Image: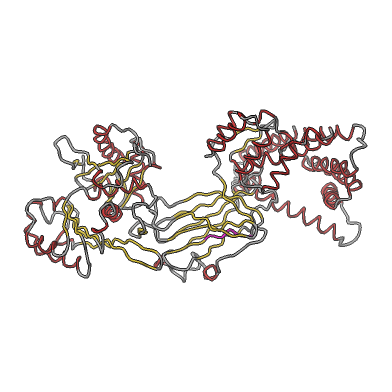
Amino acid sequence: MKPDELYIGIDLGERFSQICSVSGADRVSLKAVENAATPKGSYLFPNPVPLSRILTDGKCNDAGQLAALLGSLLSALKEKKAVSCPAGVGVCLHDFTREAAEAVRTALARCGVPAEKTAVFSREEAFAGYVYGMPPALRDPGSMVFDYDETGICSLFLKEFRSGKNVYTTVTPLFGDPQSFGPGVLGREALADKEGELSDFFNESLRSQNCAAVYLTGCYFDTDQFPEGLLKKLCTGRRVFAGQNLYVKGVCLLAADAGSLKLFGRSIPAMRNRVTAGISIMLMKGTKTCEFPLVRQGESFLLADRTCFFMEEGLDAVTLLVRDREKEPLPVELSLSGFPARDDRSVRLKLSVHFPGTDRVELRLEDDGFGAFYASTGRMVQETVLLDEKEDKADDSVASDAARRKEVPGSAPGGWLAVAGSPVLHPLAVGRTARPVWSLEELGYYIYHSICLIEKDFIGEKLLQFLKNTGNSRLAGHLVSLMEAGAPLSESLSSILKRCGLYSEDEISRLSVQFDSLKAARPHQRMNMVAENLIVNDCLKSAMENLNRILAAPKDPSLSGRFYGRVWHNLGIVNARCFLFDRAAECFAKAYEMNDRPESSAAALQAEILSRGSEYVSARAEDPDDVRAKKAISQTRDNARFTAQWRLLEQIESEKDPGNPEEYYSRMGEFLEELKESYLKLTN
C-alpha cells in the first residue's frame, strides 16, 4: 500500500450518516482514522431524507437521492482532504442485501468512484473491522456492541474460536423485542424510562458471553445521562466505550485492507457475508499435480467472484477443490466431454466462480475459443455446490452424491492445464499476416507456429504496448533491454514464449535454433516453411502460391523425396480447406508415394470419400482404413455443430415465421453473403 493513498469509510444511518478517511501510511492505527466534521462541528451529517425512504426492504427506491447523499458526504471529505479519487471506499449498510449493495456501488460510480474501488459491508463486518483495529486485549476473549437507534436495538457478539488448524472470527447478532424497542417507542430524552427493558436485553445478550469490552453506539445511546444501574452492570469485569463512529471507522479499515484479510491477522472472518469455503483448482503438468487457490476463506461474498482463464490439453475434466471450514475437501469435476480437443495447445477455458450468497457457490466452465485461430464452440458445463451446515445432501440437482464420494485426484499423466491471462479489449495485429491476437498466449502461439513469417521489425512500440495492456510490463521492459543491448531477435522471441507458458524449454530452444538457421536453409525449404506458417494463419492463397512455385521449379538434388512429399501433403491441406477435395486427394496420393507416411494415405482416402460423396464405394467390404476415414469425417461433421455459423443457422431456422417468408429469405441471404465473404478472405 502506498503511503499517500487515501481510503474512505462511510456509515449510512437512518437519519444521520458519517464519513472518515485513513492514509496508506497510517491505516494500521485506528487513531489515525479521521472523521470529517459538519460545518457545525458535529461528525453526524443529517440525511436529506430518511434512509428508509431511499432503501426499503433491501431495494433502492430512489437512485438519485442515494447518489446525492453519497456525493454530499464525499464533498465534505474533499474539502478537508482535497482528494478527488480515493484508493478505496468502504460503506456500511445496516440493512444489508445484495441489491442494496449494488445500488450503493452504482451510486458511487455516478459520484466518480469506480465500482472496483468500492466495497459494501454489513454491521457485523464493520464491527469486526473496528475491533481488529483495536489492541488484541480488547477482543480476547470476546467483544460486544449494543446498537440502539430509531430502528430498534441489537447486540453483536464477536469471538474467535479454533477449529482444526484454523482460527475463525464470528459475530452473533441478537435483536431486541420490537414491542419494547421498535421505531417510535422511545425518544432520546427518555432513556432512563427504559432502564428495565434495557437491563433485561443486556442480561440476555451477555448471558454466557465472556466479554473483554463492550461498545455502545446508536443515536439513543448518544447521551450524558446514561442510567447508573446499567453502567454498573456493563462495567463489571469489562471495559465500556461509547461513541458514534464505530461502524464508519470499521469500514474505513476494511476498505484499506482491500480484501487482503491482513486486518484479521491469523483469524479467518466467518461472520455474515463472509464465505467460509476456500476454492482451488488442480493444475496438472506432466505427472505432477499442484493446487492453485482461487477464493480464500473469509472473503466477502460480494468480492469473491472470479473469472479465470486456463489453457488445456489432454484432460477429461477440470477438478476444483471446495474446502468448507474444516471439512474434508470436496472434489468437483467439471467434465470436458464435448469440448474441443486440439493437440496444439490452443484450447482456452473460461472458469467463472459466483457466490449468490454465503450458502452456495456456482461454478461454470466455458470454451472461450482461441482468438482468431479458433472460434468458441459455445460448449459450457455448470455445477452448484451447497456450503456449510445449510447443505442439503438429498438435493442431487445441486451436489451429487457421486461427486462427494470422489477422492482428491493425484497425478494425471498426459494432462496439461495452465493459468492463462485475460484477453484484452483491443487486439494486436502481428506480422505480415496482420493476425489479430488478444492475449499473451495467442501471441506465443503465433510466434511458435509462424516463426518463418517473423521479420526484424517484429518487436515494436505496438507490441510493447500490447504486452503492457496484458499485464506484462516487466516482459516489455526486458525486451527493450535486449534491443538496446543488440541481442538477436531469437532471444526476444524466446522470452515471450517462456512467459506465455505454452511451451517447454526444449521446444523453445529448438525453435530458436530453427529461427537462427533459416538463413542457412535451402530456398525451397524456406518457402515450404513459410507456406506451413501461412496455412496456420489461414492465408491459403499465399501458401498455395509458395507450394506451387516449389513444385514448378527444377528439383533441388540436395533435397530428399520425403521433403517433396511434405510439400505435396501441404498442398493437399490447402486444397482440402478450399473444399477442392478431388485435387486434395491427388496431392495426398502423390505425397504418400514420396514419403510413405500413414497420415498422407489417410488424408488421401478421406479426400476421395468427400470428393465422390454418395458415389464412393469401398474397394473391399469393411476396409479398416475406409472405416477409420469415414469415422474421422463423421467426427469433423459433428464438430461443425459447435461453430458460430452453425448456431446462427439454427437460430434463423428456429425463428422462421411461415407467415413472413421474406424476412427468412432475407436473413438467409445475409448469412450466405457472410459465408462467401469469409471464404473469399480465407482464400485470398
Horizontal and vertical percent position of residue 569: 84, 44
What's the residue at 39%, 67% (across, down)? 390
Does residue 11 show up? yes
Residue found at the far front of this picture? 485
Residue 674, how many percent across, how many down? 66, 36
Relative to residue 26, is residue 211 drawn left or right? left
Quadrant containing the C terminus is top right
Task: Tell me where residue 530 sits by quadrant.
Answer: top right
Quadrant hosting residue 276: bottom left
| Quadrant assignment for the N terminus | top left
In this rendered view, identify the residue nearer to me: 503 or 351: 503
What span is colored magenta in the figure? 316-320
Q: Decide if residue 136 is on the left or right side of residue 509.
A: left
Predominant SS along the magenta part: strand
Based on the picture, tell me whether residue 350 belongs to the magenta stretch. no
Q: Position of residue 274 (x, y in %)?
A: 37, 57
